[in-house]
Amino acid sequence: MAASNASAIARRSKQTAQVKRVVGTAFAHLVLTVVSIGFALPFVWMISSSLKTQAQVFIFPPRWIPRPMLWSNYAELLGVWQFGVYIRNSLTIAVPSLIGAVLSCSLAAYAFARLRGYGRNVLFAMVLVTMMLPYPVTMIPLFLLFKQLGWVNTYLPMIVPSFFAFGGFYIFLLRQFFLGISPELSDAAKIDGCGQFGIYWRIIMPLAKPALATVALFDFMGNWNDLLGPLIYINSMSKYTLALGLAGLRAVRSSMTPWHLLMAGSIVVALPPMILFFTAQKLFIQGIVVTGIKG
């Protein structure tokens, strides 16, 4: 009798725990759903406004489904406002800069992580110090330097520095990831006759895909959305990037701003980074947590 009572009590306790777990999970999902809707509403409004006329943008209460949907706003944006040219210009900067940042910063990070030499830690500390310098501190000296080189009104000031390990944060991120990779792999490669560059290219780089994807994503988004750099160095409208073109849609008087086209331009600017993020989401998250294989 006592055994049956104990069994019944244990069964009820288990059922109660299951009910609590289900209720807790349902409540957590409900809260996350509400918060997600709150975060998504501005983006949904931006998409909706990009398909409206100028007069319909600020109607209250907002009309979430435009009638009619003006897909011609995007055609006007890419044609009359030359956003197709701005997309090409932004890619001209973002793609070479991405390649340069990944290659140069990974080389520097490999040197700090695996090579032994006098003053290595001091040099790495200097790299970390550069992360603390705000851009306005170096903005004028860099502009004077690039002006002396004759690079003003070209894309070179925004591309060339990335090939010289200009990103201190990228070096730090990659170095921390490389330190998590088992040194025994490098030792085995040395026994097989592999040099330092061979170890870097054939062993470290394939294992560091998550960290490299993180660096690539950050660098692409930084250059794709950059306004200050092109604003300083670019003078010709034919060389404007997407950020400059989007800023150009803002008229001197706010009442004259084509808000429906501005929303369409914002969609054009936001779409490539979103696609890139969701495509490489798994690698990106692995790179952020800086995981590595254990020796």
Image (tube, rainbow, N blue to C red):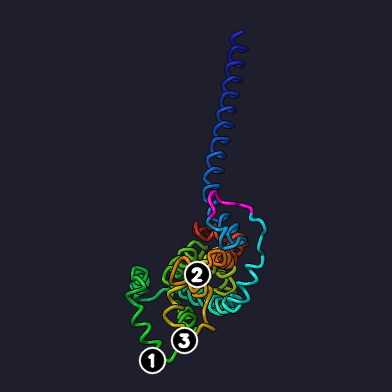
Mark 2 or 1, closer to the camera: 2
The numbered mark at residue 153 is: 3
* As drawn, 230 above or below 184: below
Q: Secondary structure at mark 1?
A: helix
Q: Secondary structure at mark 3?
A: loop
For marks 1 and 3 on the same chain, the one whose residue lies earlier in the sequence: 1
The magenta segment is 59-65
Front residue of this view, candidates 85 and 55: 55
Q: Residue at x 47, y 86 (%)?
A: 153
Amino acid at dot 2: Asn
Q: Position of residue 233 (x, y in %)?
A: 44, 82
Relative to 291, is 125 on the left or the right? Answer: left
Q: Label 2 vs label 3: CA separation?
A: 18 Å
The furthest residue to the top: 1
The residue indicated by pointer 1 is 148
Amino acid at dot 3: Asn
Q: Position of residue 232 (x, y in %)?
A: 41, 80
Q: Quadrant of the N terminus?
A: top right
Q: How many C-alpha atoms fall within 10 Å of the one at disc 3: few (<14), some, or many (≥20)?
A: some
User: Does residue 196 show up?
Assistant: no
The residue indicated by pointer 2 is 225
